[in-house]
């Protein structure tokens, strides 16, 4: 996952290949709650692993559910069944009460506190379920969650006899839930349907708990986001609850309904997440090499799958099967559209970015619900689309978008909203060849922690467009530490080229070669076929961890010897070039800026004094329990500097266009900040934050 402050996406040009998408958030959290309310164990396969499902799992654990990870599935043991018990105030008891519920039988006792982050799909249904179950609970979330309305659901639950208090602002979480007094189930329960369909979903999921008689829900106002209700009804069916639906106004939970675990449940891939890759195919995939999406097909139960129709209208060429889709460019530029997006509220954000590539002005209508999502999405989308150069008309419930006459490089604010981060990444296909900066890219963790990795696995751009930052300096100048930290802060790959020579030296020694011209060709062959991999700070050769073995003094000497063989240097060129991958690279070592990546936009050469380097190395060695003197170390370093800078092959010297950084008396943090400042100065959106 990219946990940097920002992620710069270089201009992208093409796409193709296969992506497997994470599970649907809407299905995952509904299935988790249903599994929790049933008797017995439910094995949930392909569950989405993200912030929103994590808070739900934490909540279920706190309520006493069994949660066991078993490979790629999760086993949930429910806290049901809920049988009749005349002694309980509203005719309910738990035959095997969860500890949290048991301890919370009386109001005097402390409440069970549940923190639900920014997950509406956890907050709303849990409010309903816990209010009906009985017990003392406090439900809270992040500050934005406390701005997302829940009043209509609370009103509906209160008319039933549930007792719920607002702990902050009326109508919004956090909430305190007390045991209900007596439930009034003889009248239809009215709930508003025009703010969030999650209120109705919450009631539908929770009311089977108390369906001793037919329970009727009546929706007031026009029900929005109907496809999400379809998901709810579909999943209830799988858990044994057959809700009767009369139009979209009246829903009846039949008397005697009881949750029954289906045993195993497979979670479909997220159709909203698929929208980014459908758009990607429509923007940039050749028909012969389409973007293939696995885990969800056109027959999906998720409403957002209808994004497929909208994308087709804009020109996408889409084929599919039961659980896959293939997408390529059809019409180009895309065709402008005027669409009612009520049925695909989340995926419609992707249409807004596709509209940047259309042949005219597009209008997305009936999207008022955007205002109460992770952020006010109508305002946010308008603001960020304008930054790219588009003309945008923001209405109360619509967005009208005219593509940029002239594209601009922009730093996109993401408002802690995963979908804004994901859909704006598609602006990197702009015809002006400009990069896009996504601020706070880790917000995608809400539903798709590896979104950018998935994007970069199927997006392509010519190598010269992938930025490289080169860092070099004499031995013990701290360049490795600096380079890997800079790479981390930019979310870039890191190439420690010295390690390649060290690995080659180790491999050549093990093969019994003399490390000189006598075996130059054999060592070069070894180097050209090195099965080396860098993973999580470790260096692996054919899956053998050689991280420590290549760091010895002897390995350093051997590396120095093989690095002086021209054929070996040539053999490693292709491998080093292969590290230039999206979104960018920090390359550390001798000839990075001169031979391997001469076109790198920034080259930095460290010039710490020998005295300072000797002192640092001394501290390092002492801390490892190796005794030595500063004077000896300094003499060694000076001798090595001389040898390195005077050798014929790849001598140690700054690239002509390198910026010099004397880090003798600087902390690593200060050096990192300096390099990042230089880097930022080279970017198209310099100064935008
Ligand atoms: O940076 P280091 O100490 O890990 O490098 C090991 C040896 O390899 C050192 O002698 C310099 C040499 N080297 C090189 O010749 N070219 C590079 N790009 C990187 C390292």
Image (cartoon, rainbow, N blue to C red):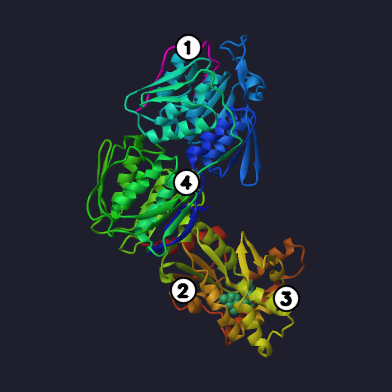
Q: Nearer the viewer, mark 2 or mark 4?
A: 4
| Marks 3 and 1 in Cβ contact (< 8 Å) | no
Count of numbered tags: 4
| Depth check, front residue: 608 or 385 | 385
Number of other residues with Cα within 10 Å of mark 2, as a class: few under 14, some 14 to 19, many 20 or more: some
Q: Quadrant of residue 515?
A: bottom right
Q: Does the stretch in magenta take in 193?
A: yes
Q: Main secondary structure of the magenta part?
A: loop
For the point 57% across and 85% down, which residue is it?
649
Q: Earlier in the sequence, mark 3 or mark 2?
A: 3
Label 1 sits on a secondary structure element that is loop
The stretch in magenta equals: 175-194
Quadrant of the displayed image that contains ligand 1? bottom right
Callout 1: few (<14), some (14-19), or many (20+) C-alpha neighbours within 10 Å? some
Give the residue pinned by disc 1. 184
Please give the residue where the numbered disc 4 appears in the rendered image: 443
Where does the image place residue 386, in percent across and percent down from the top left?
Answer: 28, 50
* Residue bearing the label numbered 2: 658
Closer to the camera: disc 3 or disc 4? Answer: 4
Q: Secondary structure at mark 2?
A: loop
Tag 4 or tag 2, which sits nearer the N-term? 4
Q: Which residue is label 3 attached to?
A: 554
Residue 684 seen in this snapshot: yes
Q: CA distance from mark 2 to mark 4?
A: 35 Å
Is residue 567 rendered to the left or right of residue 324?
Answer: right
Q: Are marks 3 and 4 in contact (CB under 8 Å)?
A: no
Residue 384 rendering spot, x and y as whole percentages? 33, 48
Residue at coordinates 46% horizontally, 18% vertically from top-left?
Answer: 215
Mark 1 touches mark 2? (CB < 8 Å): no
As drawn, which residue projects farthest toward the bottom? 518
């Amino acid at each position: 996952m990219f946990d940097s402050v920002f992620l710069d996406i270089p201009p992208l040009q093409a796409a193709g290949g296969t992506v497997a998408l994470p599970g649907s958030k809407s299905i995952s959290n509904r299935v988790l709650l249903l599994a929790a309310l049933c008797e017995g164990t439910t094995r949930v396969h392909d569950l989405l692993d993200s912030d929103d499902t994590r808070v739900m799992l934490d909540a279920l654990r706190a309520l006493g559910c069994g949660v066991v990870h078993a490979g790629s599935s999760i086993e949930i043991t429910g806290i049901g069944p809920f049988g009749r018990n005349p002694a309980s105030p509203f005719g309910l008891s738990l035959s095997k009460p969860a500890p949290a519920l048991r301890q919370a039988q009386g109001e005097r006792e402390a409440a069970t506190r549940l923190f639900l982050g920014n997950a509406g799909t956890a907050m709303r249904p849990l409010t309903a379920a816990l209010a009906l179950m009985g017990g003392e609970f406090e439900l809270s979330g992040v500050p934005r969650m406390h701005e997302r309305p829940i009043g209509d659901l609370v009103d509906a639950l209160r008319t039933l006899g549930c007792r719920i208090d607002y702990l902050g602002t009326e109508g919004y979480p956090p909430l305190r839930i007390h045991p209900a007094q007596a439930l009034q189930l003889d009248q239809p329960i009215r709930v508003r349907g025009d703010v969030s369909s999650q209120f109705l979903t919450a009631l539908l999921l929770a009311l089977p708990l108390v369906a001793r008689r037919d329970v009727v829900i009546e929706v007031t106002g026009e029900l929005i986001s109907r496809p999400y209700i379809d998901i709810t009804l579909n999943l209830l069916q799988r858990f044994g609850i057959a809700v009767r639906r009369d139009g979209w106004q009246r829903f009846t939970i039949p008397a005697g309904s009881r949750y029954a675990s289906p045993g195993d449940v497979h979670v479909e891939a997220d159709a909203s997440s698929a929208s980014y890759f459908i758009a990607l195919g429509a923007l940039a995939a050749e028909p012969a090499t389409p973007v293939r999406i696995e885990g969800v097909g056109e027959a999906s139960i998720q409403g957002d799958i209808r994004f497929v129709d909208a994308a087709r209208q804009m020109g996408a060429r889409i084929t599919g099967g039961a659980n896959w889709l293939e997408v390529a460019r059809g019409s180009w530029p895309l065709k402008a559209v005027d669409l009612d997006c009520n049925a695909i509220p989340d995926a419609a954000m992707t249409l807004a970015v596709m509209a940047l590539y259309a042949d005219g002005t597009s209008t997305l209508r009936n999207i008022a619900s955007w205002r109460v999502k992770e952020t006010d999405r109508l305002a946010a989308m308008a603001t960020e689309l304008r930054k790219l150069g588009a003309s945008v008309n923001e209405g109360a419930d619509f967005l009208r978008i005219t593509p940029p006459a002239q594209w601009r490089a922009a730093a996109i604010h993401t408002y802690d909203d995963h979908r804004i981060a994901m859909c704006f990444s598609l602006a990197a296909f702009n015809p002006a060849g400009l990069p896009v900066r996504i601020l706070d890219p880790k917000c995608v963790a809400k539903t798709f922690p590896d979104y950018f990795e998935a994007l970069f696995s199927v997006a392509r751009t010519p190598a010269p467009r992938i930025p490289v930052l080169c860092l070099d300096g004499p031995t013990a100048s701290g360049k490795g530490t600096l380079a890997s930290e800079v790479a981390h802060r930019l979310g870039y790959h890191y190439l420690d080229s010295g390690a390649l020579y060290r690995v080659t030296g180790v491999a050549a020694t093990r093969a019994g070669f003399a490390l000189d011209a006598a075996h130059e060709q054999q060592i070069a062959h070894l180097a050209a076929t090195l099965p080396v991999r860098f993973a999580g700070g470790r260096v692996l050769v054919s899956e053998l961890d050689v991280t420590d073995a290549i760091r010895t003094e002897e390995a350093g000497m051997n590396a120095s010897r093989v690095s002086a063989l021209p054929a070996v240097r040539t053999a490693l060129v292709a491998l080093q070039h292969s590290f230039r991958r999206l979104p960018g690279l920090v390359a550390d070592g001798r000839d990075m800026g001169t031979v391997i990546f001469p076109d790198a936009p920034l080259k930095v050469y460290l010039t710490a004094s020998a005295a300072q380097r000797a002192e640092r190395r001394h501290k390092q060695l002492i801390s490892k329990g190796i005794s030595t003197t500063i004077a000896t170390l300094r003499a060694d370093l000076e001798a090595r500097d001389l040898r390195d800078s005077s050798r014929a092959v790849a001598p140690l010297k700054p690239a002509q266009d390198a910026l010099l950084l004397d880090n003798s008396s600087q902390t690593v943090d200060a050096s990192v900040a300096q390099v990042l400042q230089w880097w930022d100065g080279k970017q198209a959106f310099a100064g935008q934050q």
